[in-house]
Amino acid sequence: MGLLTEKDFQHDTEKELDRYQGLLEAGLSEEEARKSSAGSGDPWTLWHKLPHDCFLCHKKLTLPFIYWHGVDDQMIGFHIQCAEHLSEPSQKT
């Protein structure tokens, strides 16, 4: 489970450089490491895996929102208010 914010969708240059350095240390050539690490800091690879509608109210998700892996590794997303509403019955016990 996690909380996604706008920061999660900004390009992460440090992550891309870390992957590049790791690939160089693993023995790849500079060109191979550059090609393999390109895009590893790109947040859009994450975005395509995430749900676009709230599981509870079925309205479009907006940032920030809560997500987690459901059955068969399917991503489930909730508006923060919907997640709070869903958890209310369990908080009363």
Image: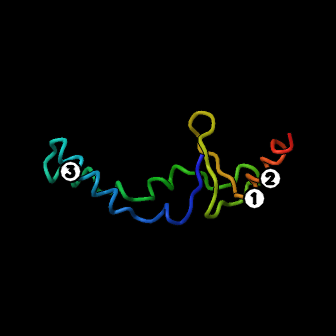
In this view, the residue in front, 10 or 35, is: 10
Q: Are marks 1 and 2 in contact (CB under 8 Å)?
A: yes
Q: Along the horizontal axis of the image, is 3 left or right of 90? A: left
What's the amino acid at mark 1?
Gln
On the image, the x and y values in percent for residue 52 come to: 62, 56
**For residue 50, side relative to residue 16 (left or right):** right
Q: Residues within 10 Å of mark 2 (few under 14, many from 20)?
A: few
Mark 3 touches mark 1? (CB < 8 Å): no
Where does label 3 land, which residue? 33
Q: Residue drawn at (34%, 56%), measured in percent from left and top? A: 15
- Of the numbered discs 3 and 1, the one sitting upstream in the chain is 3
Residue where numbered disc 1 is placed = 81
- Which corner quadrant of the image does residue 93 belong to? top right
Residue 85: mark:
2
Please say if 72 is above or below 33. above
Question: Comparing marks 2 and 3, which lies closer to the viewer?
Answer: 2
The secondary structure type at the circle numbered 3 is helix
Q: Position of residue 57 (x, y in %)?
A: 77, 54
Q: Determine whether the residue tagged by mark 1 lies in a helix, strand or loop.
A: helix
Q: Earlier in the sequence, mark 2 or mark 3?
A: 3
Q: Residue at x 84, y 44 (%)?
A: 89
Q: Give me the C-alpha separation between circle 3 and circle 1.
A: 43 Å
Q: Please tell me the numbered disc located at residue 2.
A: none
Q: Specify the amino acid type for callout 2.
A: His
Front-lying residue, 84 or 39: 84
| Residue 80 location (% of width, % of height) | 70, 58
Q: Are marks 2 and 3 in contact (CB under 8 Å)?
A: no
**Gap between marks 2 and 3, in whole Å?**
46 Å
Locate residue 62, reporting x and y percent.
64, 64
- Quadrant assignment, res 75: top right
Are there few (<14), some (14-19), or many (20+) residues within 10 Å of tag 1? Answer: few
